[in-house]
Image (cartoon, rainbow, N blue to C red):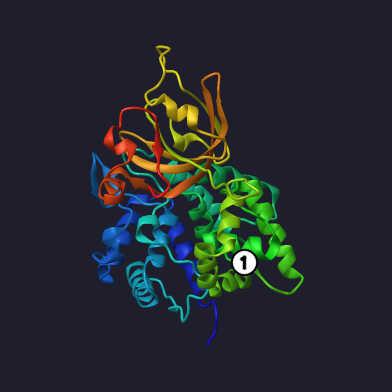
Amino acid sequence: MENFTWVRVYNKIAHKILEYKNKSKELAELMYRSLEDANLMYSEEKGANLDSNEGKRCRYTEIDPISFMNRFEMYNNKNRRKLIESFEKNTGMEIDIPKDFDGLPTISPQMSSVIRFMDTREIDDIPNIWELFDIALTGDMEDDNNRNKFIEYYDKVISKPCASYNISIGLFKIRPDVFLNLDHVNRIYIEREYGIKITYCPRGKKYLSIVEYIKNQLNKSNQSLLDFSYKAWKNKNNIKEKIAHGKEYSKNYNVMYGEEKMNNNRKYYWLNANPKIWSFSELKNGETIEYTAINENGNKRRIYRNYQNAKKGDMVIAYESTPIKAIVGICIIEEELKDNILKIKKLETLINPISYSDILNEKELSNMEYIQNPQGSLFALKEHE
């Protein structure tokens, strides 16, 4: 059977979607119409990362192109083909339905969106993704002007809480000969094959340099980025098993957070941010903030001992309070308390923020210090929490 038949189909679909660049609302309508015609509207779609307005979950009234294409990766191969057939019908296109989906990463419904909720996203969030999608799909990355434009919009987009590595997955799907997917499986495989440790989502210039290096290495054996991703995809079960159970997990966990040796004394914390005052989401991965243990009145913050106990290398869950009310990232203590200042570095932006309501539904978390009394900023977490 011919391999990679999905490549030309996805590229063709992407060009069709680009026609909706200034019609994001019409694209959302097309998405739901295609899902309904494929009888998929009430399967995985019901668990998808839907929009949110005035505290209520709802359908998207407008959608970006990468979130749209992610819908194809929420399903098994049979339903993928059904959705492609429905898209073909609703657009009047002629599409050769793929015979295979080899090497394509799947996406859970909860990770399907790369835009924030209607209540919290900024006015240029969706237009920025369109600009990135356009230049990635149609631009020559060897041209300096195109590269600079790509980097500009890539950096804008990945800084958003729902984007991060999800963007590279979207780029790979539309041009797998040009862009590299940086999902978890590929990142581990990249480290195994080339010794490149990707500790957090790279910015545009760094991302392109990684892609260029790997392409050059692959060219030596007449292989492509698609070949590389296919090998990682074929080995994904073996990779995931080693991540979860073997020494490789310990190595990668500590490499990811900048340690040479396993830290058996690591502690864990939950840090609140009020997005009306400051936001984790505005921090770039790798950026450090200084957080004071003294409030504006000169008094020690509640549970001051947590600030005293926090040590370099301890992990921090980044939570944004009302109106976001979700875990949006992962941080690390960069420097211990000195002159009542704690330095905290942001490591990861969650592709799909975890809502407070989901946390409340977990019985194992019911005794968390934050759950017991949410008044304050820095809360201790037990390792299992």
Residue at image x 37%, y 24%? 302
The x, y position of residue 280, in whole percent, is 45, 35
Instruction: Give the camera-side residue of 350 and 342.
Output: 342
Residue reaching furthest right?
Answer: 220
The x, y position of residue 273, in whole percent, is 40, 31
Disc count in the image? 1
Residue reaching furthest bottom?
Answer: 1
Q: Quadrant of residue 366?
A: top left
* Residue 348 versus residue 241 in the image, above or below: above
Is residue 324 visible in the rendered image? The answer is: no
User: Secondary structure beneath disc 1?
Assistant: loop
Residue at image x 70%, y 55%? 142
The x, y position of residue 282, in whole percent, is 48, 35
Q: Which residue is mark 1?
A: 177
Q: Is residue 129 left or right of residue 195?
A: left
Q: Residues within 10 Å of mark 1 (few under 14, many from 20)?
A: some
Residue reaching furthest front?
Answer: 265
Q: Quadrant of residue 239?
A: bottom right
* Residue 220 versus residue 129 in the image, above or below: below
Residue at image x 63%, y 51%? 207
Q: Quadrant of residue 230?
A: bottom right
Instruction: Give the camera-side residue of 199 and 260.
Output: 260
Q: Amino acid at mark 1?
A: Asp
Residue at image x 27%, y 63%? 33
The x, y position of residue 363, in whole percent, is 26, 50
Residue reaching furthest top?
Answer: 297
Is residue 280 visible in the rendered image? The answer is: yes
